[in-house]
Image: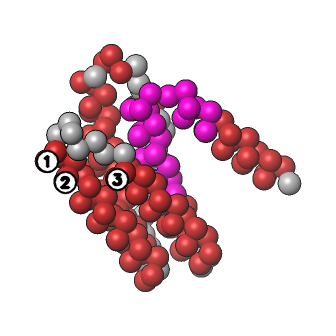
Amino acid sequence: MYRQNAMQQYRHAQASAAIDSSPYKVISMLMQGALDRMVSAKGCIANNDIAGRNHFIGKAADIIDCLKNSLEHKHDEEMTNNLDNLYDYMARRLFHANLKNCPDTIDEVYGLLDTIYDGWKELEDKLPDAGVSVASVERQPLPLSK
């Protein structure tokens, strides 16, 4: 009971932070959320928790879809088209990982999104007026596959 209440408070705090954040911070939080859910999905695979795996891979895919839908093609059409295609690829790979119970495929998608996230942090350095601290978002390393 206490654990469930604590989780609800944590989710509420995250939602409140997102509302008060700049668009740059929201994108950062989405990326971090997808990365965290992939870590959780791998933990579920290691523990033979099929329902958990389905849940966390589905959530990661939903977040990636949200990232894809947030792209603004008017700014840099080539880059956003490339990201659009990459997000689509990641979502398909997560579907494959879920279908085949494949932690290596989750590792692949994690690596791709982690690279985008690193680039997002570099973007922050070029936009000092954005008032965002993407680097302050703490990431969990993806556990190695066995």
Measured Cα–Cα span from mark 3 to mark 1: 14 Å
Which is nearer the N-term, disc 3 or disc 2?
Answer: 3
Residue drawn 21% across and 39% down?
74
Q: Main secondary structure of the magenta part?
A: helix
Q: Alpha-carbon neighbours of circle 1 within 10 Å: few (<14), some, or many (≥20)? A: few
Q: Alpha-carbon neighbours of circle 2 within 10 Å: few (<14), some, or many (≥20)? A: few
* Left or right: 76 in relation to 51: left
The disc at residue 68 is: 3
Q: In the picture, residue 56 is in which quadrant?
A: bottom right
Circle 1: element type: helix
Name the outermost residue toward the top. 129
Q: Alpha-carbon neighbours of circle 3 within 10 Å: few (<14), some, or many (≥20)? A: some
Which is nearer the N-term, disc 3 or disc 1?
Answer: 3
* Left or right: 68 in relation to 29: left
Q: Which residue is mark 1?
A: 78
In this rendering, does residue 100 appear at all? Answer: yes
Instruction: Look at the image and say whether residue 63 sits in the magenta stretch.
Output: no
* Left or right: 27 in relation to 19: left
The disc at residue 82 is: 2
Rendering colour mode: secondary structure
Give amino acid for label 2.
Asn
Circle 3: element type: helix
In this rendering, does residue 143 appear at all? Answer: no
Instruction: Look at the image and say whether residue 20 sits in the magenta stretch.
Output: yes
Q: Which residues are magenta?
A: 14-37
Q: In the picture, residue 119 is in which quadrant?
A: top left
Give amino acid for label 3.
Lys
Name the outermost residue toward the bottom. 100
In this rendering, is residue 37 above or below 6?
below
Give amino acid for label 1.
Glu
